[in-house]
Image (cartoon, grey):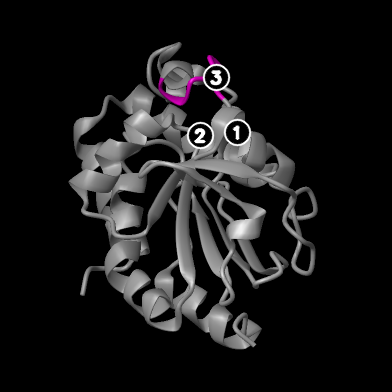
Amino acid sequence: MPDSLTTQFEALHAERQRTWPAAQLQKNIDQRAALSARYDAAAHIQTGQRLPEFTLKSVDGGTITRNDIGPNGAVFVFFRFAGCPACNLALPYYQTTLWPDLKAQGIQLIAVSPHVPEGLIDIKTRHRLDFTVASDTDNAFGKALGITFEPDDISAVPPSGWIGEVIGTHSWTLPQPTVLIVDKDARVRFVEVSPDWLKRTESDVILNALTEAKVTA
């Protein structure tokens, strides 16, 4: 069983403390703190609301819409992009600790990023992810949910223009790491948004929320 996401992210941050220039590290810390400080839980989709219409592009081909949510509901995990270090810890963690339980219950797991489908193939194949990975073109779904953000200081993230190129939007807009549990009618039964991208929802929290929500009922 892998370490918790919290433990893995603490190790990632400790490695950066050892290897990153102090100024770069501080910018990263300050940006995450600023996003956390201005986070407004009322600004995004709420429990009880129905998902807006959306169209996602699966990296395996085809599209996913609201009508494709199965009879046992779905868990959506929003992540930033395929090269995001924290995302490359989170998705394999969900593959091992979350997906087996969801699969056994017939619940879909859909990981969503604005990264273009061709780029997302890499993270899916590299980690042998068995669940659905899909692209949210132009952040349309993320924006409709109210979970996107833009950094205050682009020097705290990769070189100018790079993010916009990999996600195909030529902007710095990205989704905040988010977990949504929805029932067969696409109604939200659980939502957790993580403005600090080094703090994300643990699998046991999702599984407990599924039990309480009883999305398959």
Q: Mark 3 points at which residue?
A: 169
Residue 198, horizontal then vertical, whole percent: 42, 49
Q: Tag 1 or tag 2, which sits nearer the N-term?
A: 2
Task: Return the x and y of residue 112 as percentages of the image width and height.
Answer: 49, 46
Task: Describe the element under mark 3 as helix, strand or loop.
Answer: loop
Residue 145 percent location from the top left of the image: 70, 47
Q: Which of marks 1 and 3 is nearer the N terminus?
A: 1
Q: Is residue 42 above or below residue 214?
A: above
Crowding at label 1, few (<14), some or many (≥20) Cα neighbours within 10 Å?
many
Q: Which numbered circle lies on residue 114?
A: 2
Give the secondary structure at mark 1.
helix
What's under tag 2, amino acid-wise? Pro
* Quadrant assignment, res 42: bottom right
In the picture provided, is 69 more to the left or to the right than 1?
A: right
**Circles 1 and 3 in contact, beta carbons < 8 Å:** yes
Instruction: Report if the CB atoms under discs 3 and 2 are less than 8 Å apart.
Output: yes
Task: Give the vertical position of 197 relative to 137 (above or below).
Answer: below
The residue closer to the viewer here, 193 or 138, is 138
Q: What residue type is labelled 1?
A: Asn
- At a point 48% along the width and 18% down the height, the residue shown is 164
C-alpha separation, residue under disc 2 versus residue under disc 1: 5 Å
Total tally of numbered discs in the picture: 3
Residue found 38% across the figure and 41% down from its top: 59
Q: Give the range drawn in magenta.
A: 166-172
Please state which of residues 17 and 78 is positioned toward the viewer in this rendering: 78
The label shown at residue 139 is: 1
Q: Which residue is drawn at 32% across and 75% down?
A: 100
